[in-house]
Image: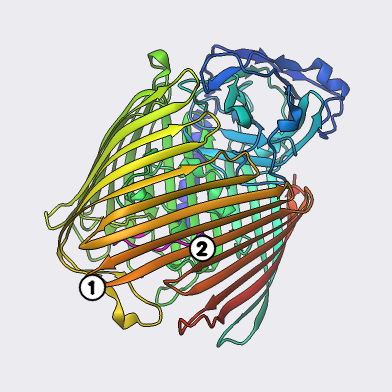
């Protein structure tokens, strides 16, 4: 495996030498010349530094929402400067009603700011209309950042070192941002970057942008920032040592105290090609998964949250799998993700979500001219009956046409068995966001072939999808996906093989003069086994009405058909595994109606709920879901979720309940406490996760993480400690 990684690295370096001189530039309807400064700036949220008087200034903003191309209600000014080490952005946001500014989120960094008044910026450092970074802040100076995995989807779990400060004023609010050039990747010979800015005024439902198209903005919709020269990337070396002290205990285990050092090294082999080495990797500070109860036959999909795999994650994306916008598939997100060749949660995690040691790993990723390239090599420890495994992922894609790409992927190794496994895949991603009237069309074609020891034939997968995902007017999509019965992406994700998956979506959104939006649509999906022995079909008709503030209501009618050729367990009581409820072989047709509403997230008290009732296989079901968020102070937020599904079948009745309580308390901008309590009555497991984080400054932080799981073995509300551990972790990034 090491030899494979070296060979791939050599290929990347050769490619780099051949293509590194190629610089991509695109024209835009808007551009500006950035100003270089030699003055010192203090990032405190007050635009009083002398340097700001020299900055390039942008004030030609228009609405993208609710009514695109019209004048906003308030004035916005953005100032841009740079020096050897930083890109500086200042923002002045006028507001005629400053006491109504929505800013209920506080703390150093959060995973979303979508409910607050905010300022957001997109940086497309390669100016390729495909990739980019997103930086956001609010009037409290709280930060959020993400990296775009596709043009229309960014990953909020990605983070890097940058600085922000904000303040309120009688005229509105002000922000200052400093982004180190060492924190982002770019080509040093390219003096022109793509850039865009937006501002949100939540109480009015306004999204104010420098540039937008079809009421959206993303890395394909950018202006030009010209004149970046002499930028200091340093030697491109980040060293992050950390140490974790851990104490584990359980109902039968004796306490175990351990100390685990780990080391992550990041190095830029070229200004746009990054290398990462991890030794004795520790993920103890990673957030826990949100609990789900599976009432289907198929695997659920959980998103990646670990930083090592999130860095440059966009490079490893394949065929835009899972990135389409419909959310009405047969068993939720898992169907949309089906056929993914690389799913990083297969590494370092068991099927039950338990951590498996990663002894060492390396990653190369970045851009070389028009090419995006990536390689990951991991040595994973033994787990259960599985030997230690060497795992490898290689990915390369080239930008073609204006906004499209073509690429290859390969994987080697199987973390879940001792069988040899490999995969190769090809994908073509087409995008044209410059059709008349701002309309969009996109298409994806991909093919994969897996090779598994002892199995031959019927190991291919194919897909085609064509979409017009317009935010107003007519939208439509058609697609077909086929996964043969022996297709086995051991480092990817499948929840169903030996199937042909057909989808069609047709809808229309009407925007009223008031900017209220009414959306209607019909969606169909048919998943048929290739031998005709089973099928799953779902037909959906939906109507939705939304205010510009995102107060909304919807109703959805669903017709489902299931042909089942093998009985499956739908419910197994934890207290009596022998009394599982089984859905027998047969053909089932049932209808359900789901309705719900939600209130705008900028308020201190926010609620959303949905109710569904109808048939369920050879019985009936009722489901209620709710989420209530209360933010009495900016330093305190409580979120309660509750879901109960009541099933009545001839084979027996049961209820599945999932409850979650999240408490977030940013005590200061650098010290925060968060707790997450989860319970479900199927596993009878009560889980507590508590995290205390002290951020001395970006790149220097300290964690105390408590995980405690309790089990009601007898189902009599007598919970017994099943597992408990406490971890203390310190990170320190040395940047050269």
Residue 491 in sight in this render: no
Q: Is residue 291 magenta?
A: yes
Looking at the rendered structure, the secondary structure element under dot 2 is strand
Q: Is residue 24 magenta?
A: no
Q: Which residue matches tag 1? A: 651
Provide the major secondary structure of the magenta segment.
Answer: loop
Looking at the rendered structure, the secondary structure element under dot 1 is loop
Q: Residue at x 83, y 17 (%)?
A: 53
Horizontal side of 239 relative to 430 (left or right) equals: right
Residue 448 in sight in this render: yes
Residue 666 placement (x, y as % from top left): 74, 52
Q: Nearer the viewer, residue 88 or 640?
A: 640
Horizontal side of 511 relative to 173 (left or right) equals: left
Q: Nearer the viewer, residue 579 or 368?
A: 579
Q: Residues within 10 Å of mark 2 (few under 14, many from 20)?
A: many
Q: Residue at x 62, y 17 (%)?
A: 72
Label 1 to label 2: alpha-carbon separation = 26 Å
Q: Which residue matches tag 2? A: 659
Start-end of magenta stretch: 288-299
Q: Residue at x 50, y 73 (%)?
A: 685
Horizontal side of 622 relative to 49 (left or right) equals: left
Q: Nearer the viewer, residue 73 or 197?
A: 73
Residue 643 placement (x, y as % from top left): 45, 59
Q: Residues within 10 Å of mark 1 (few under 14, many from 20)?
A: few
Instruction: Indicate whether 8 appears above or below 701.
Output: above
Res. 405 image quadrant:
top left
Q: Nearer the viewer, residue 676 or 461?
A: 676
Quadrant of the image containing the N terminus: bottom left
């Amino acid at each position: 495996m090491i030899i494979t990684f070296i060979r791939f690295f050599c290929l990347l370096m050769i490619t780099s030498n051949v293509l590194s001189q190629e610089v991509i530039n695109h024209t835009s309807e808007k551009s500006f010349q950035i100003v270089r400064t030699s003055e010192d700036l203090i990032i405190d949220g007050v635009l009083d530094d002398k340097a700001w008087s020299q900055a390039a200034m942008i004030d030609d903003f228009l609405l993208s929402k609710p009514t695109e191309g019209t004048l906003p209600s308030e004035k916005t000014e953005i100032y841009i400067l740079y020096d050897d080490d930083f890109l500086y952005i200042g923002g002045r946001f006028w507001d005629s009603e400053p006491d109504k500014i929505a800013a209920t989120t506080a703390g150093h960094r959060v995973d979303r700011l979508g409910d607050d008044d905010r300022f957001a910026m997109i940086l497309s450092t390669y100016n390729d209309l495909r990739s980019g970074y997103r930086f956001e802040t609010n009037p409290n100076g709280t930060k959020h950042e993400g990296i775009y995995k596709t043009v229309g989807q960014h990953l909020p779990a990605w983070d890097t070192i940058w600085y922000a400060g904000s303040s309120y004023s009688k005229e509105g609010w002000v922000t200052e941002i400093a982004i180190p050039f060492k924190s982002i990747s770019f080509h040093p010979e390219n003096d022109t970057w793509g850039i865009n800015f937006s501002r949100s005024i939540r109480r009015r439902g306004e999204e104010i942008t420098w540039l937008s198209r079809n009421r959206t903005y993303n890395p394909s919709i950018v202006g030009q920032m010209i004149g970046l020269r002499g930028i200091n990337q340093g030697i491109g070396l980040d060293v992050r040592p950390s140490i974790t002290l851990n104490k584990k205990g359980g109902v039968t285990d004796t306490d175990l105290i351990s100390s685990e050092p780990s080391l992550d090294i990041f190095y830029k082999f070229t200004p746009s090609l990054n290398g990462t080495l991890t030794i004795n990797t520790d993920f103890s500070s990673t957030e826990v998964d949100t609990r789900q109860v599976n009432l289907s036959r198929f695997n659920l999909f959980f998103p990646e949250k670990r930083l090592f795999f999130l860095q440059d994650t966009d490079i490893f994306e394949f065929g835009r799998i899972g990135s389409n916008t419909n959310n009405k598939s047969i068993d939720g997100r898992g169907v949309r993700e089906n056929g993914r060749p690389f799913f990083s949660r297969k590494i370092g995690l068991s099927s039950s979500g338990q951590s498996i040691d990663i002894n060492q790993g390396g990653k190369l990723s970045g851009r070389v001219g028009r090419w995006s390239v990536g390689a990951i090599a991991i040595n994973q420890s033994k787990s259960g009956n599985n030997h230690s495994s060497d795992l490898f992922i290689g990915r390369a894609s080239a930008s073609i046409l204006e906004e499209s790409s073509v690429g290859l992927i390969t994987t080697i190794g199987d973390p879940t068995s001792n069988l040899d496994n490999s995969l190769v895949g090809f994908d073509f991603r087409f995008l044209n966001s410059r059709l008349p009237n701002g309309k969009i069309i996109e298409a994806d074609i991909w093919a994969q072939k897996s090779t598994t020891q002892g199995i031959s034939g019927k190991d291919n997968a194919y897909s085609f999808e064509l979409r017009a995902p317009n935010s107003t007017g007519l939208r439509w999509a058609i697609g077909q996906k086929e996964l043969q019965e022996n297709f086995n992406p051991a480092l990817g994700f499948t929840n169903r093989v030996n199937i042909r998956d057909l989808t069609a979506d047709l809808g229309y959104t009407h925007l009223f003069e008031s900017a209220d939006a009414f959306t209607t649509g019909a969606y169909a999906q048919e998943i048929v086994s290739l031998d005709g022995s089973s099928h799953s079909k779902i037909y959906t008709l939906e109507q939705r009405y939304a205010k510009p503030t995102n107060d909304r209501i919807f109703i959805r009618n669903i017709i489902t058909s299931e042909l089942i050729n093998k009985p499956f367990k739908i419910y197994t009581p934890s207290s009596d595994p022998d009394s599982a409820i089984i859905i027998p072989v047969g053909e089932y047709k049932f209808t359900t109606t789901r309705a719900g509403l939600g209130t705008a997230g900028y308020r201190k008290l926010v609620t959303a709920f949905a109710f569904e009732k109808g048939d369920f296989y050879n019985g009936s079901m009722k489901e209620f879901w709710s989420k209530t968020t209360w933010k009495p102070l900016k330093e305190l937020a409580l979120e309660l979720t509750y879901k109960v599904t009541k099933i009545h079948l001839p084979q027996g009745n049961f209820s599945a309940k999932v409850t979650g309580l999240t408490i977030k308390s940013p005590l200061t901008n650098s010290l925060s406490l968060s707790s997450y309590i989860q319970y479900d009555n199927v596993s009878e497991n009560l889980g507590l996760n508590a995290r205390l984080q002290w951020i001395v400054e970006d790149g220097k932080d300290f964690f105390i993480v408590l995980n405690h799981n309790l089990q009601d073995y007898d189902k009599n509300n007598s919970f017994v400690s099943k597992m408990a551990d406490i971890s203390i972790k310190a990170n320190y990034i040395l940047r050269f």
